[in-house]
Amino acid sequence: MKKIITLATLMIVMALSSMCSAANWYWLASNDEHSIFIDTSSAYRDGHWLCAWYKWTSTDGSYQLVEEKSTIYNRRIYYKMGNLCAYNANRHLEFSHNYNFQHVDELPPNSIGEVAFVKAMYMYKDK
């Protein structure tokens, strides 16, 4: 019986570990309030869209994880959000929502988001 429990536990641990993947956060841009990182292990191109998870950190220690698709059209940058998870400085989840990439918004020109997007798009221009 002890062997069966041990074997079952081992199988569950192996199954869960194969579903997990570690994020590889790469710095894109910062200003006085935020820093933006891209998860290079999740980023990929889908036609004209750059798809990735981003981490927005604040100076107070809180942060947001954002799944986003972004593109350039007529010299303007547009994005759609998938999942958003907001954490406080103690790493406790405060809010989460799945936006299902339903709404397209324009990034404000000359913003930290624009700087981060341009750098990310350059990194993934040929991928």
Image: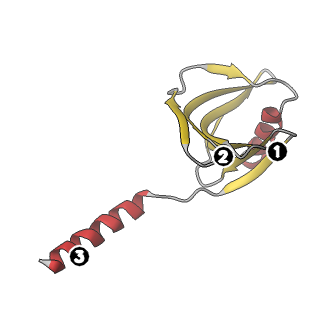
Whether residue 126 can be seen here: no
What secondary structure is found at the residue carrying circle 2? loop
Query: For mark 2, does the 10 Å Cα neighbourhood hold few (<14), some (14 to 19), or many (20 or more) residues?
Result: few
Looking at the image, residue 118 lies above or below residue 12: above
Task: For marks 1 and 2, give the CA distance.
Answer: 20 Å
In this view, the residue in front, 36 or 109, is 36
What's the mark number on residue 29?
Answer: 1
Q: Name which residue lies at 86% across and 40% down.
A: 31
Q: Name which residue lies at 87% across and 40% down.
A: 32
- Count numbered badges in the picture: 3
What secondary structure is found at the residue carrying circle 1? strand
Relative to 81, is 100 on the left or the right? left
Residue 24: x and y in percent read 64, 58
Q: Name which residue lies at 41% across and 64% down.
A: 17
Q: Which residue is mark 2?
A: 89
N-terminal label among 1 and 2: 1
Query: For mark 3, does the 10 Å Cα neighbourhood hold few (<14), some (14 to 19), or many (20 or more) residues?
Result: few
The three-letter amino acid code for the residue at tag 3 is Thr
Residue 115: x and y in percent read 83, 37
The three-letter amino acid code for the residue at tag 1 is Ala
**Tag in front: 3 or 1:** 3
Whether residue 11 can be seen here: yes
Residue 125: x and y in percent read 73, 44
Residue at the extreme left of the image, as rendered: 1
Locate the N terminus by quadrant.
bottom left
In this view, the residue in front, 125 or 57, is 57
Q: How is the image coloured?
A: secondary structure
Q: Name which residue lies at 68% across and 43% down.
A: 62
* Quadrant housing residue 56: top right
The three-letter amino acid code for the residue at tag 2 is Ala
Q: Which residue is mark 3?
A: 6
N-terminal label among 3 and 1: 3
